[in-house]
């Protein structure tokens, strides 16, 4: 079997893998990175989105061997020193998750979008996120969260900046239970 060496969320791993093993399977089943989830397995939903060398990819459409020698970042690599990434915080503050299943992929895709377009308007956000589906259909607040995160991530604005929206965001008890990482544990 091929041997691969991959840097995932800042840690280097070397493993022997089946040539047909998908990157998402490698992340979840070998490394235990279950924050990255599988929604469709057919490259349609975007739930499995991670970064490969800083750019978003659907990890169900990439083989683990293709990641050999590369850097992979998952949703689990975003928080630093116990502090949520501004995008994670913005999703929380803007009620941009319901069941949370799509959230890891949404956040990883939004991060790639904001790296390319630091101040996107709503249309650019919707275009940039079109490959990610939310079966709870919470798109309005997802767009809102990405816009909010863009402001928080402007140079000179630290990740701990408080949410400043004037309009209260409705919440439900289910939302309070959903983790910001959106990572399902199975
Ligand atoms: S699980 Fe990869 S795109 Fe849906
Ligand atoms: S799929 Fe449920 S919050 Fe997007």
Image (tube, rainbow, N blue to C red):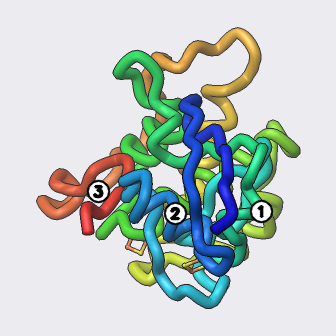
Residue denoted by label 3: 170
Q: In this view, does 101 lie above or below 70?
A: below
First of labels 3, 2 by sequence position: 2
> Which image quadrant is residue 16 in?
bottom right
Residue 98 percent coordinates (x, y)? 32, 66
> Is 112 situated left or right of 86 in this image?
right
Residue marked by disc 2: 26
Please provide percent x and percent y for residue 44. 65, 86
Q: Distance between the residues labelled 3 and 2?
A: 37 Å
* Residue 131 against residue 117 in the figure, above or below: below
User: Measured from the top left, where is residue 85 in percent x and y?
Assistant: 51, 31
Alpha-carbon neighbours of circle 3 within 10 Å: few (<14), some, or many (≥20)? few
The residue labelled by disc 1 is 66
Of the image marks 3 and 1, the number of the one nearer the N terminus: 1
The C terminus is located in which quarter? bottom left
Q: Earlier in the sequence, mark 2 or mark 1?
A: 2
Tell whether label 1 touches label 3 (CB within 8 Å): no
Task: Provide the secondary structure element on which disc 1 rests.
Answer: helix
């Amino acid at each position: 079997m091929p041997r691969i060496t991959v840097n995932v969320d800042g840690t280097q791993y070397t493993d022997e893998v089946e040539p047909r093993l998908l990157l998402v399977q490698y992340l979840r089943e070998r490394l235990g990175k279950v924050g990255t989830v599988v929604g469709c397995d057919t490259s349609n939903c975007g739930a499995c989105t991670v970064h490969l060398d800083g750019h978003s990819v659907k990890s169900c459409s990439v083989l683990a061997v293709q990641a050999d020698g590369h850097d992979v970042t998952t949703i689990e690599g975003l928080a630093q020193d116990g502090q949520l990434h501004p995008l994670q915080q913005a999703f929380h503050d803007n009620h941009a998750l319901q069941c949370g299943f799509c959230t890891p992929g949404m956040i990883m895709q939004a991060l790639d979008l904001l790296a390319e377009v630091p101040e996107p308007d709503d249309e650019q956000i919707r275009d940039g996120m079109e490959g990610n589906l939310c079966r709870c259909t919470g798109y309005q607040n997802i767009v809102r969260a990405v816009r909010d995160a863009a402001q928080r991530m402007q140079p000179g604005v630290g990740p701990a900046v408080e949410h400043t929206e004037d309009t209260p965001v409705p919440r439900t008890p289910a939302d309070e239970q959903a983790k910001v990482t959106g990572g399902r544990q199975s």
